[in-house]
């Protein structure tokens, strides 16, 4: 059974599907980036999020991991729906997504131009740099 908080996070992220991609965006329906989508999902659970918007178009993966840990997330190997997945591009983590179902993720993905729910395909699995659970 899915944890209640995970279900809330996934519901909030799904409500953002189709929202245009916008770097440092934090407004569902208007514009979100990958970090903004996670912020929206976490805030839907009632969590108080310290939201930093001082990152470039390619966020620093170390800072992402530190921010996740600062909000109470812990790294896990057995990722499941409701977990935040960290993906590496150019050999370093730079992108986050929310696991929405076994084998599926929701993320604000610049190449798609919007928030999408996609399969966690082999190319995405190769880029997986870690999973975090709240």
Image (cartoon, rainbow, N blue to C red):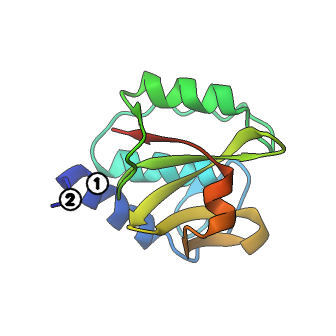
| Pointer 1 local density, CA inside 10 Å: few below 14, some 14–19, many at least 20 | many
| Pointer 2 local density, CA inside 10 Å: few below 14, some 14–19, many at least 20 | few
Q: Nearer the viewer, mark 2 or mark 1?
A: 2
Mark 1: which secondary structure?
helix
Residue pictured at 78% horizontal, 69% vertical: 111
Q: Where in the figure is residue 15, as x and y percent of width and height?
A: 42, 71
Residue position for label 1? 6
Q: What distance separates the C-alpha of mark 2 from that of mark 1?
A: 7 Å
Mark 2: which secondary structure?
loop
Q: Are marks 2 and 1 in contact (CB under 8 Å)?
A: yes
Q: Residue 46: name its quadrant.
A: top left
Q: Is residue 65 left or right of residue 77?
A: right
Q: Where in the figure is residue 50, as x and y percent of width and height?
A: 48, 29
Residue position for label 2? 2
Position above or below: 33 against 105:
above
Residue pictured at 52% horizontal, 74% vertical: 17
Q: Residue 61: name its quadrant.
A: top right
Q: Where in the figure is residue 41, as x and y percent of width and height?
A: 41, 53
Position above or below: 40 against 130:
below
Q: Is residue 120 visible?
A: yes
Position above or below: 82 against 17:
above
Q: In the rendered structure, find residue 55 and report the number of the disc placed on it.
A: none
Quadrant occupied by the N terminus: bottom left
In the foreground, 116 or 33: 116
């Amino acid at each position: 059974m899915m944890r209640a908080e995970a279900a809330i996070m996934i519901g909030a992220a799904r409500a953002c599907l189709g929202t245009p991609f916008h770097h440092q965006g934090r407004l569902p329906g208007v514009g979100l980036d990958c970090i903004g989508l996670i912020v929206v999902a976490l805030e839907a659970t009632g969590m108080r999020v310290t939201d930093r918007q001082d990152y470039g178009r390619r966020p620093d993966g170390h800072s992402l991991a530190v921010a996740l840990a600062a909000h109470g997330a812990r790294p896990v190997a057995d990722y499941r729906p409701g977990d935040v997945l960290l993906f590496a591009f150019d050999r370093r983590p730079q992108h986050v997504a929310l696991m929405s179902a076994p084998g599926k993720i929701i993320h604000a993905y610049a190449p798609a131009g919007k928030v999408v729910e996609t399969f966690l395909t082999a190319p995405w699995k190769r880029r997986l740099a870690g999973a975090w659970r709240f």
